Image: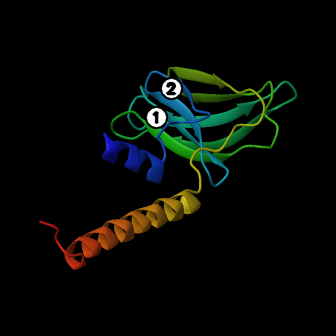
Amino acid sequence: MACGVGITLLFGTSGVAGAIQYGADFVLPQADGTTQVHVESFAPGVNVEVRLVCPIATTLLTSTTAEADGTITVYVTLPANVDGCSINVVGGAVDKSFPLAGALPATGNDAGSLLQVGFGLLALGLIIVGVGQLRRRVSPQVA
């Protein structure tokens, strides 16, 4: 139990903040500002277009070819405000849409400071235990 709590304190909890997921298909914002789009169920080798569909205009973000297993995974850069827009992925008989609402939050975080605090507390605990062990060895035994 204590080990699990320590790991959670050091590394945080995992999760997909801001992900839009439908079955195995998902749109996932990345910490570097890009957005990962992963869609399955295409015919192998089919040409696939990833578009940003907004009320004002539709923009082709990228195009790719489906892998042998029928999946595509691409990274695209979205504008700052995507409120009312959707990501549309089209290829062959597949046409999937992922509605977006406002700016997408980035996933992941900088755990550096949390790791420093965790290792600092670990070092402090080891020092306290070491001093306690040393005091037991040095102090005279009362019979």
Q: Is 128 situated left or right of 135 in this image?
A: right
| Secondary structure of residue under mark 1 | loop
Q: Which residue is disc 1 drawn over?
A: 46
Residue in the picture at 32% in, 66% down? 129
Residue in the picture at 49% in, 42% down? 73
Pick the front one: 46 or 25: 25
Residue 96 location in percent, x, y? Answer: 57, 22
Q: Does residue 92 sit above or below 122 in this rendering?
A: above
Residue 95 location in percent, x, y? Answer: 57, 21
Chosen colour scheme: rainbow
Q: Which residue is disc 2 drawn over?
A: 92
Outermost residue toward the left in this view? 143
Spatial distance from mark 2 to mark 1, Cα to Cα? 6 Å
Residue in the picture at 62% in, 33% down? 18
Q: Is 63 situated left or right of 46 in this image?
A: right
Residue 133 location in percent, x, y? Answer: 25, 70
Residue 81 location in percent, x, y? Answer: 82, 37
Q: Residues within 10 Å of mark 2 (few under 14, many from 20)?
A: few
Q: Earlier in the sequence, mark 2 or mark 1?
A: 1
The picture quadrant where one finds residue 56 is: top right
Q: Is 100 situated left or right of 23 in this image?
A: right
Q: Which mark is residue 100?
A: none
Pick the front one: 48 or 71: 71
| Secondary structure of residue under mark 2 | loop
Taking the image as drawn, is residue 17 in sight? Answer: yes
The picture quadrant where one finds residue 97 is: top right
The picture quadrant where one finds residue 134 is: bottom left
The reply to whether callout 2 and callout 1 are in contact (CB within 8 Å) is: yes
Residue in the picture at 59% in, 44% down? 107
Taking the image as drawn, is residue 65 in sight? Answer: no
Outermost residue toward the front in this view? 143
